[in-house]
Amino acid sequence: MSHFLAKASLAALIALSSIPLAGSAAVAAPQTDFVVKAQYHYRPPVRGCSPMEAIRKARYSGLRDVRISNITPRRVVVAGRDRRGWDRMTFANVRGCPLMYR
């Protein structure tokens, strides 16, 4: 019976001594505020035909050595070479770069 009382008192002592530690840990938690901020890089939307997209479409259509010839609010003109010689392609300056004429 004395072993039972010794073990019970030891368990009660450990239980009582751990209560203030849990309380101090709970108090310490709000003092350490770690704020994690996500960084978002804003890219403005492309409203018209970007020159790189016009060059990419002209290369896909068969032009080589493609370069931007002229950019206006309505059209993007690229020039390059194909099998017959120099050629130009004109794209509308809207989203998607639709081909106006070649």
Image (cartoon, rainbow, N blue to C red):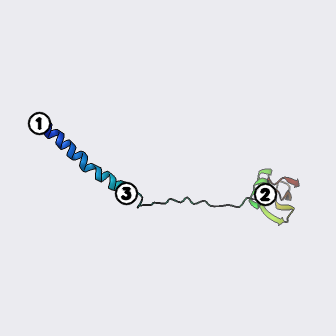
Name which residue type carries label 3: Val
Name the residue at 85% across, 53% down. Answer: 99
In the image: residue 38, left or right of residue 97: left
Residue 30: image quadrant is bottom left
Name which residue type carries label 1: His
In the image: residue 70, left or right of residue 18: right
Residue 54 got which mark? 2
Answer yes or no: do the residues labelled 2 and 1 have beta carbons within 8 Å? no
C-alpha separation, residue under disc 2 versus residue under disc 1: 89 Å
Mark nearest the camera among 2 and 1 is: 1
Q: Judging from the image, what secondary structure is the residue with disc 3 in?
A: helix
C-alpha separation, residue under disc 3 versus residue under disc 2: 62 Å
96 w.r.t. 10: above or below: below
Q: Judging from the image, what secondary structure is the residue with disc 2 in?
A: helix
Q: Which badge, 3 or 1, comes first in the chain's sequence?
A: 1
Q: Counting other residues with Cα less than 10 Å from the Cα at mark 3, is it few (<14), some (14-19), or many (20 or more)? A: few
Name the residue carrying label 3: 27
Q: Counting other residues with Cα less than 10 Å from the Cα at mark 2, is it few (<14), some (14-19), or many (20 or more)? A: many
